[in-house]
Image (tube, helix red, strand yellow):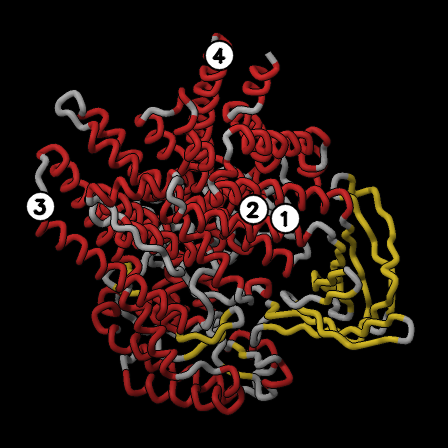
Amino acid sequence: MLKKIFNLLVSLEVTVIFAILYMLSQIYATLAFSSDSDAWLYVYGRGWFEAIQWILALNLIGIMYRYKTYKKKGIFILHLSVIVILLGAGITRYFGKEGVLHLRVGETSSMIMLQNKANPADVGMLDMGFKVKLDKFVMHKYPGSTQPSSYDSYVTVIDGEKSFPYHIYMNHILVYKGFRIYQMAYDPDEKGSILLVGKDPGMWMTYLGYILMAIGFIMSMFERKSRFVATAKKLKESGLFAFILMLGFTFVTPSQAISIDEYAKNSKAVSVEFAKGLVQYNGRIKPLDSLNLDFIHKITKKAKLNGMDYNQLVAGMLAYPDIFSKFPMIYVGHPAVRELLGLKTKYAAYNQFFDEMGQVKFMKQIDLAMQTPDRERTTIQREWLKINERIYVAYMIYSGKAFAMFPSMNAKNENYKWYSIDELNKLDPLTHRFYFNLFKQLVNGIKTYDVNKVKEINQKIYKIQKEYSAPILPSQSRVNMEIKYNHMKIFPSLIGIYSLLGLIAIFIGFFEVLKTKKLNKIEFTLVALGWLALFAHTANMMLRWYISGHAPWSNAYESIIFIAWGSAFASLMFFKRSMLALGAGLFMAGMFMMVAHLNNIDPQITNMVPVLKSYWLLIHVAVITSSYGFLAVGGMLGFLNIILFGLRKYKPLDFQIKEINNIIYLSLWMGLALLSVGTFLGGVWANESWGRYWSWDPKETWSLITMIAYAIVIHSKMIPKMKGEFLFSLLAFLSFFFVLMTYFGVNFYIAQGLHAYGRGEGDATWFNVLKAGIGVWMMIVVAMISMAIMQKNKK
């Protein structure tokens, strides 16, 4: 009887039930509460949440004993790592200390202010046993902007007779007597520093757990008796899988009478020359070609309009503001707003938004949208905010405010600030008459289509820029490469290339399965074309890296591009012998590339926030986004396998379905391994940057939820009621909704937490689709587990 109870309680079915409860509690915390403190108050800080974690740990120990995992070293170490991580987290939770040390320049203190996250009103003080004096605080900003590049605290640690200086900045911490002191924030006047202080006795045990998990995954890949190796062996024998270990992964000039069509016909050459000039925008020096592309994309959602490219459009707006302000080019997405404006197309003219007095007609709607909290805004309100931004960007061009091309004559003492004519006009027009004259000549060169004149003025402006701002100027080769990067448009082209190759491969795959015939020459051609596309993808990423000066996965656009790369790489490197698997990976790469170029994703190259200036960016983001590629392949293959199930009535396909399921299993296993290692590498980075390796931030929380979901799917082959090939394929497909929520849901809808630098704006409809997909996954798993438990009880 006791053995029966033990076997019932210590079973995979019970583990899955508590794992789902654990997932649901985290989902509730991220979706129901808009603030970190509320999530802690009602979920993460509650006893019932702790109880679920401890039950999971105890249950896992029982599972390891019952199923004798110690006989398989890799599997044993992998499962042991989870227990070690939970123990380390428990020590941190119950015995760790965390507080804030706020110092003004010249101030000394040994006291930190402690705060209970589950109860923010519960504030205490702790004496560190040594003092810290803030000698100096330095704020570094990107040239000509207020955007922080880094912020640094120069302190002196005083411990009795002993003292020493130290430099604290983001990703560079002070460790002394068990305390870890981080640069967290600063006072608005930049004369004070806010330091986060932590004492975490569980940190090293948690790190040990992370290391054990990585070792466990690696050992499992080579362990003879592991399911991963057994599955890989089956595929190798069948010729469907070549296993290779991944090694790494308002200034307005008078206008002449001219028509838009005439300008479009004659302005191409002069606009190209105009675009070679350098401009400072948001702390970055870049060619006007990039600024023009960014601005026109914001205004029109296109790179071309009415036969004019983005450089022609910006040059025309600058040279002929009275004509272009009547030209419909402000994109209006929502039908209700278009109806209000009386539009028959999706574009409105700039002057349609202003009355005769020059006031914005729809300021009431815009103000209301601004005052409404982000999560409560309606679709129309979001549209008004987008239109407001487009109107402002257009105003910046018409007024000349966008073109900060002229360095201050005291540039070094002004953080190499560059000014536009609009700004100089407000400062001191007489002193800067030379700048005004140059800009006027530049505009006149555009109006007369004088390419040589525009080239001459650009050279004169560049000479001034070099005289006053040489240290911050990009090399001419980098400028030229950035312009080439903009014009080649490789990333947008890959949408069609990947999607077409993927669809052809899927079609060929189905043909081969149904006809039991191999089309070797076509397969070779598709694989070769896939590698060429991936090579172009990789080369363009490297080019973007060279232009920006940092790894090309630091914002939303770049990370989606990298996920697409991972999906294509996974299919070509690991699953190229199966046309369905190859097609699934390439098609998903095309879909990700398409998502990257949707209207709500900003493709411009940007500066990095201070926390991202770390070698951890290369490691953590590269590993975790690579995992999405493998999981995408598994999800797409799950969908294709479901189609094969539907075709079984016409032809016996059991062997092919089983082979595809084996590929799905390997793809999910490798994706889960990379996701787990990448998530915990992020934890180490977070500990080096923010002072805590786990803070229940929505991004990291959803990564954990996703890991648990895939762990359940991978273990489902050991649960009687979940062994079926169809159910495994279905769950593999539905599980990808967790990945989509982790990336798109958190970044573009939840949009809060420590990962806010990767945020965007999302449509509630798609967010509801993601929630529905996850809900279906939950219902299926719960139903199957319930049936399995009832079956056991009958026995």
Q: Earlier in the sequence, mark 1 or mark 2?
A: 1
Distance of mark 1 from mark 4, alpha carbons? Answer: 37 Å
The residue nearer to you, when weighing 222 against 512, is: 222
Q: What residue did someone put label 1 on?
A: 694
Q: Position of residue 141 (x, y in %)?
A: 61, 73
Q: Position of residue 125 (x, y in %)?
A: 87, 52
Q: In the image, which is nearer the foreground, mark 1 or mark 3?
A: 3
Q: Amino acid at mark 4?
A: Met
Residues packed near mark 3 inside 10 Å, few (<14), some (14 to 19) or many (20 plus)? few
Q: In the image, which is nearer the foreground, mark 2 or mark 4?
A: 4
Q: What residue did someone put label 4 on?
A: 790
Q: Earlier in the sequence, mark 2 or mark 3?
A: 3
Disc 3 secondary structure class: loop
| Identity of the residue drawn at 48% across and 65% down | 606
Residues packed near mark 4 inside 10 Å, few (<14), some (14 to 19) or many (20 plus)? few
Disc 1 secondary structure class: loop
Q: What residue did someone put label 3 on?
A: 519
Q: Amino acid at mark 3?
A: Leu
Residue at far front of view? 71
Horizontal side of residue 507 vs 715, given as left or right: left
The residue nearer to you, when weighing 701 against 71, is: 71
Contact (Cβ within 8 Å) of mark 1 with mark 3: no
Q: Amino acid at mark 2?
A: Glu
The numbered mark at residue 700 is: 2
| Identity of the residue drawn at 59% across and 76% down | 426
Distance of mark 3 from mark 4, alpha carbons? Answer: 48 Å
Asked if 51 appears above or below 37 in the picture, the reply is: above
Q: In the image, which is nearer the foreground, mark 2 or mark 3?
A: 3
Horizontal side of residue 208 vs 450, given as left or right: right
